[in-house]
Amino acid sequence: MLLLRLQEIIERRQLSALFQPIINMQTGTVVGYEGLIRGPSDSPLHSPMNLFKVARANGLSAEVEHLCRHVVLERFAAQELPGKLFLNVSPESLLASGIHDGKTLGYIHGAGIHPDRVIIELTETQPTYDYDLLREAVMHYRSMGFQIAIDDLGEGFSSLRLWSELRPEYVKIDMHFVQGINLDPVKLQFVRSIQEIAAESGTTVIAEGIETQTELLLIRDLGVGCGQGYHIGRPQADPAKTLPLDLAKTLSLNGIAVYPQKNAFGRNLVTALKLLRIVPVVSPDMHNNHVYELFSSDPELQIIPVVADGTPLGLISRPNFIDRFARPYLRELYGRKSCTAFMDGDPLIADKDSSLQELSQKIVAADRHHLMYGFVITDRGRYLGMGTGHDLMREITEMQITAARYANPLTLLPGNVPIDEHIDRLLGSAVHFTACYVDLDHFKPFNDVYGYRKGDDVIQAVGRILSEHCDPNRDFVGHIGGDDFILLFQSEDWEDRCRAFLDRFAVEMPLFYTEADRNRGGYMSEDRRGERVFHPLISVSAGVVKVQPGQYGSHHQIAAAAADAKKQAKKIAGNSLFIERRTAGVFTCDSD
């Protein structure tokens, strides 16, 4: 039934062409259109996926592809669309017999289109094996004036190999890596890496599947040459020839996108393999006298694993073995017996690919002696070596110190490294922005009197309130450390946002106190000299610096200027906003 319908479609040319615009991400101009195909709207073969599936099943792929190209070329020419036409072609079609028969060139000449306006977009539907033949076919089409694009980079069977073999003029990044890129640092890194390779090889990157303004601006900031997607324009039979004004305005915004932040512990995943130590092992038929000799000959040896045919059976610890072996008559009784007599038969075992976080949780849940004696490291159940609790604690401590530079563990907001990176991006883009340094007043005595748990609640509330008053697509919220935060505004209404979060603080901060302390506006406590003093409720000081392009040269200078503005704000009682305007030489301060 479907075969008959397909044959009817071919005979009657019942295919329709749609065109989706592709734009220059930096200028907003339409550089061309991808030609798409649809079957009859009332047919189960309306979808191109179903159309080509039935064609392949019945050996009609070549006929359908040729018809698709012919229809797309005719409609492109008839509508006098500007720019280039991206024409979908499968590699197997190029490799089919008769690739030099000139059919495609005949279609183009018949439509009145010059070959240099046509991009042959290679779309894989099955693996490509004969790269030499494919390279020859591509060279043939290039000699006629065509250019080459590779579709769905990162999704196909061998798209990276195709890129290397064919050296196309364009590569299209699969929409999977574009959609949600503002939320996924891995996708961000993938696109950034592809763009860097493309820049080195002289290839233009096209990001497919752009569906939001945030994705559009982030792709633009990564330097990607071209973009395509529903946010830019949906496939239409009669597409627009210029970009809508609102979209052109968005692309011309003088600012940068806010990059997604990596998980603090996920930047460089460290596994148990890093803790691997090679120690002597014994087999279960080894006598205890021999184990004693091993311990005696090496005073640093604390643990001996018992391994049989690569499988770990248990651990013999030095303190336990020496203590028991030194007892009267035990050496005589057990000296020539199997070492398993003094073995801990339930050792802690970790696969080499276990993360240190998983390993740490496993040790915490187990008996405490495992932290002292260590753990066995295996590779899919096969013994590799040992790890010690000391090495684990040292490595996790180093990871925590490193992680704190990237994300504050209390608020999970970006730490000093991403703060500095974002400031440098702002400075490098020569955009106007506003740096706001936020600090809490009277926080230390609150921490002393109400306890660190309550203090942590306050810090988390500050991070939440600041984040709620920023535009996540344009503004950056960072946690410098302790009770210090920084906001990097690109929003034009930054001052309104600052006043709004000060108002929110005025409402929420008193809720952390007892009713009695709220009513009196503070509390009494002893200072360092043991004298009773009155401490006001926590307030917030915000110092603001408006940054003009070229005014500052580094994030260090921005940080110093913002810190100075914060110091001025702290001189004002209550929740305060201090704005420093260096270019005008005017200083403005407000107090709640």
Image (cartoon, rainbow, N blue to C red):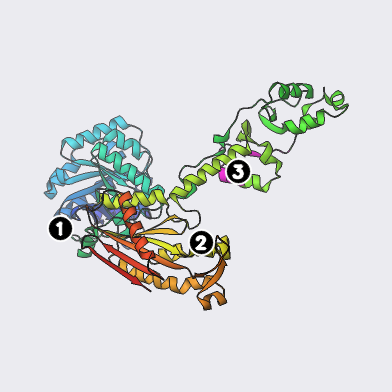
Q: Return the residue nearer the eye: 373 or 211.
A: 373
Q: Residue at x 40, y 73 (%)?
A: 503
Q: Is residue 159 left or right of residue 401?
A: left
Residue 46 in view here: no
Q: Which residue, given by chain and number where applicable, does mark 3 sit on?
A: 359
Mark 2 residue crowding within 10 angstroms, few (<14) / some (14–19) / many (20+): some
Report the front residue among 514 and 203: 514
Say which mark, if any, is on residue 493. Answer: none
- Expressed as whole percent of the image width and height from the top left, the position of residue 458 reads 50, 64
Which residues fall within the magenta stretch? 346-360
For the point 30% across and 34% down, which residue is it?
164
| Res 135 → quadrant | top left
Q: Nearer the viewer, mark 3 or mark 2?
A: 2
Numbered badge on residue 444: 2
* Label disc, if present, on residue 79 of the rendered structure: 1
| Earlier-in-chain disc, 1 versus 3 | 1
Mark 3: secondary structure: helix
Q: Residue 95's quadrant in the figure?
A: top left
Residue 462 rendering spot, x and y as whole percentages:
45, 64
Question: What amino acid type should be assigned to the residue bearing mark 2?
Answer: Lys
Q: CA distance from mark 1 to mark 3?
A: 64 Å
